[in-house]
């Protein structure tokens, strides 16, 4: 039974090796260690800008049904 838990420990040592490398890199270069975070933030920003451009295009073409039909009090 003890070998089973040592196997789990070894598995997570292997899976978390890239994160350990990033932790060691942070002592040398903060920007290098946070490159992945910056990369995902740039992807998110580009996706948001693309989404806003698409929404503006649909709004300019009047493709959305803006009739009020959900509640009678509106």
Image (spheres, rainbow, N blue to C red):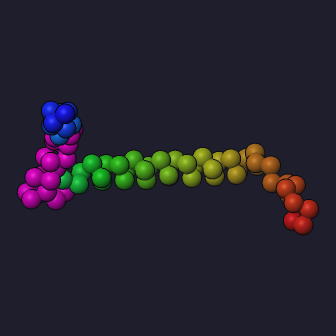
Q: Residue at x 8, y 57 (%)?
A: 28
Looking at the picture, how far across and down is residue 51, in whole percent? 55, 48
Q: Which residues are magenta?
A: 12-32
**Quarter of the image with the C terminus in it:** bottom right
Residue 50 in magenta stretch: no
Q: Is 21 in front, or is 13?
A: 13
Query: Of all residues shown, which one is farthest toward the front?
Result: 1
- Residue 47 seen by the camera: yes
| Image: 2 above or below 67 | above
Left or right of 53 on screen, residue 61 = right
Looking at the picture, how far across and down is residue 57, in whole percent? 65, 47
Q: Residue at x 87, y 55 (%)?
A: 69
Q: Give the main secondary structure of the magenta stretch.
A: helix
**Quarter of the image with the N terminus in it:** top left
Looking at the picture, how far across and down is residue 8, in whole percent? 21, 37
Q: Residue at x 15, y 53 (%)?
A: 23
């Amino acid at each position: 039974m003890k070998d089973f838990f040592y196997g789990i420990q070894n598995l997570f040592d292997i899976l978390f090796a890239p994160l350990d490398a990033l932790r060691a890199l942070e002592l040398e270069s903060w920007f290098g260690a946070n490159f992945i975070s910056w990369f995902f933030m740039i992807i998110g920003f580009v996706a948001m800008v693309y989404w806003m451009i698409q929404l503006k295009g649909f709004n300019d073409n009047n493709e959305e049904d803006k009739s009020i039909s959900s509640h009678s009090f509106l």
